[in-house]
Amino acid sequence: MAMHLGRLSAGPCWRAARGCCGELRAWAPRSAAGRLCRPPGTAGPEQSRGLGHGPKTRGGPRLRTWLAAGLAGLAGLAAAAFGHVERAEMVRKSSGTQSPPPGKPEEEDDDLARRCSCFMALPVTDLRELRGRPGDMKTKMELLILETQAQVCQALAQVDGGARFSVDRWERKEGGGGISCVLQDGRVFEKAGVSISVVHGNLSEEAAKQMRSRGKILKTKDGKLPFSAMGVSSVIHPKNPHAPTIHFNYRYFEVEEADGNKQWWFGGGCDLTPTYLNQEDAVHFHRTLKEACDQHGPDLYPKFKKWCDDYFFIAHRGERRGIGGIFFDDLDSPSKEEVFHFVQSCAQAVIPSYIPLVKKHCDDSFTPQEKLWQQLRRGRYVEFNLLYDRGTKFGLFTPGSRIESILMSLPLTARWEYMHSPSENSKEAEILEVLRHPRDWVR
């Protein structure tokens, strides 16, 4: 059952977030000899290898994509785009040795506690368990999504200057839970949701059958297949029609077979949905994402940009939901560490890619006609999420799912008009042309 924790301004987590989350401290345990070790989730010189994207992708129905959709529904990652049937790959550009996993020094407890004090709420996983596995990817990813949630919420609240985030901590009886942070009816934002989920348990036999039907052989034990899934998901709808909507989601999945073999993969992306086209904004957004991708390989941005354009397609309308961004799924090579650092770079690009656009346009003047067009475009947003997004659809039809978190991505208001068509050569027609024929904004 979900537990409402009240308004953030009255709670210590929000005060901590305002005070320190602009630059969250890394969890930096020290070795027994007193040497500062590399914290989980940060790259040392030996981990700075670039990443390129694989020479090919595997087509056809992909099993992990279905699993991602199912777990997204259970976890409440409403805005996650899990509907791809393609698998992303990254290849190692150079070799090198990984740093040994950090130990468990004396100062670790205090360092982890101080890092957690900057989050919107305490981690879903018990702190004793996190302390016991500081180098494990599940620990690193949970801390990353909590950090991302806190930083984004802080940035949004500072821009809005009016409404406050409510923090809703919920539990999943099958294992795990999540933290949903939602701001509504603010000065700048009509609705802004940033949710994290950390869930675990056993896949149902039905899920295992679905995976086998797509060609995957999984070794179950007594019909059970343990899994862990975690991610951060956000959709932000400003009030001003000249300020764009953004969606982002980054996630990690792990499945353990009966023989102890673990299969893992990452997924995620970030995309922009403006009501009106502003080319300067589009270039800024895409350039920021490209710079994050280029740190890990020059081929990543163009591949994941196309993937994003292809996925967010409203087939019955013949147009995209927005002007795209990046999207990837089933990313499991060349190593956990390298893919994690790529995901980390993408997550850190959210604020610089988006907040300047909101600040630029939140006080722009607009006409009733422009507000009407925003409502009509939001109708398209709703259509995509309810009709095409596999995570949303699976969650709505799965018993025990948290409906409020699944539908967090929907705007407060939207509109549908019969046979509405914008005037030729209008600003409304201009954005429609881009939605029907995606552009390359940066090279």
Image (cartoon, rainbow, N blue to C red):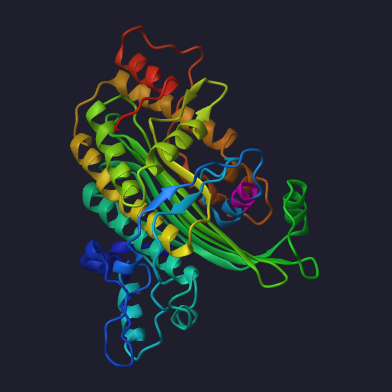
Question: Residue 326, percent across and down?
Answer: 41, 41
Query: Which stretch did the figure color magenta?
Result: 64-70
Dominant secondary structure, magenta: helix
Q: Is residue 413 left or right of residue 11?
A: right
Whether residue 189 is visible, yes or no, is: yes
Q: Quadrant of residue 274?
A: top left
Q: In the image, is residue 419 part of the stretch drawn in magenta?
A: no
Q: Is residue 2 visible?
A: no
Residue 75 against residue 184 in the figure, above or below: below
Q: Which residue is at the front of the view, 262 or 205? A: 262
Q: Residue 69 lies in magenta, yes or no? A: yes
| Residue name at image x 66 percent, y 57 percent | 400
- Give the quadrant of residue 99: bottom left
Residue 21 is left or right of residue 130, and the answer is left
Farthest-out residue, front: 95
Image quarter in which the C terminus is found: top left
- Quarter of the figure that contains the N terminus: bottom right
Give x and y (percent) for residue 133.
48, 79
Q: Position of residue 348 (x, y in %)?
A: 31, 54
Measured from the top left, where is residue 120 in percent x and y? 36, 65
User: Residue most toward the right?
Assistant: 222
